[in-house]
Image: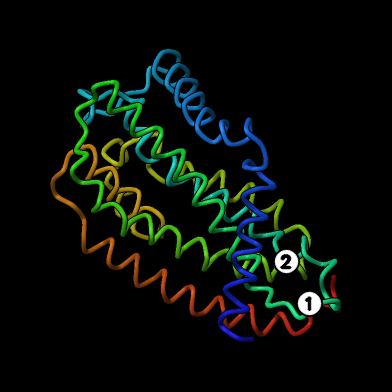
Amino acid sequence: METSKIGAMFSYFLKREMTDRYLGNVMGLAWVFIQPLITLVIYSFVFENIFKARIPEAAHLGFAVYLAIGFWPWTAFAESLLRSTTAVIDKKSLLGKVKLDLRLPVAATITASFILHMLGYIVVLIALALWGKPLHFEMLPLIVPALMILYLLALGFGFLLAAVQVYLRDTAQIMASVLMLWFFATPVIYSKSLLPETVRQWLFLNPVYPAIDFIHQALLFGTNLPWLSLLSSGLFAVGLLWMSLRVFNRLSTRFEDFI
């Protein structure tokens, strides 16, 4: 397929994903900005006032700030996986009717999720700045590589899940439970300093952890940025994406037989 046609089809699927979810009307567009603020208020009240959650090294900032910094990048990653899992199945009506590179709707689904959640993240960061929290906003350019690695990880896992879902229709339900466990295995609502040393040493097995940790370190403290672990995570993400594309291409030859 020509590069221009690939670009046009990807743009079509990306636009459809974004308009179908939120941006098709004025209230939908407004919700992209309102929902993150409502979520932040709810989480702040529940964890800070009811559960009395505290982050020792970020006590001067408060639990809500620590949560906000890591929660939206994680949510972008997690929702991308869930939505990409059914991306091929959702396009089954097109199979056999048009020549379609099924990698495109998967990539478009993940990209749309990241774009919308990053818009929400910007709103949250602006709210924190207006709140007067002493975050290191000068470090914002440095978190871009961490966000890109999360995006590459989502693509890598997403292509695998989308392909497996065609053959194993329970994949989406299984991933919903896996992501819940994955969330609590990642220091998003707690600090790694609260974990026992025997547990902390296994965090490197979590491919999402280096990116979330880097974002926390950059925006909350501005020092001791874990570049080496982020680089390792980036190399893993690239390798995963390469492998997942090969698997997807191999399995896609029989998609029509199972859909």
Q: Quadrant of the C terminus?
A: bottom right
* Image coords of residue 90 (percent x, y): 77, 60
Taking 139 as reference, is 96 above or below it? Answer: below
Residue at the spot x=37%, y=22% of the render?
53
User: Residue pushed farthest left?
Assistant: 223
Question: Which amino acid type is shown beneath numbered disc 1?
Answer: Phe
Residue 20: where, in percent of width, then height?
A: 69, 47
Q: Is residue 27 above or below residue 143?
A: above
Q: Residue at x 21, y 60 (%)?
A: 227
The amino acid type of the residue labelled 2 equals: Val
Whichever of callouts 2 and 1 sits on the residue coming sooner in the sequence is 2
Label 2 sits on a secondary structure element that is: loop
Q: Which residue is mark 1?
A: 255
Q: Quadrant of the N terminus?
A: bottom right
Q: Which mark is residue 88?
A: 2
Q: Residues within 10 Å of mark 1 (few under 14, many from 20)?
A: some
Give x and y (percent) for residue 192: 30, 41
Picture quarter containing residue 4?
A: bottom right
Q: How is the image coloured?
A: rainbow
Q: Is residue 111 left or right of residue 60?
A: right
Q: Looking at the image, is 40 positioned above or below residue 25? A: above
Distance from label 2 to label 1 (Cα)? 9 Å
For residue 141, side relative to residue 42 (left or right): left
Residue 137 or residue 237, whichever sits in front: 137
Q: Using the rendered view, name the quadrant where residue 166 is placed.
A: bottom right
Of residues 192 and 32, the one nearer the viewer is 32
Q: Residues within 10 Å of mark 2 (few under 14, many from 20)?
A: many
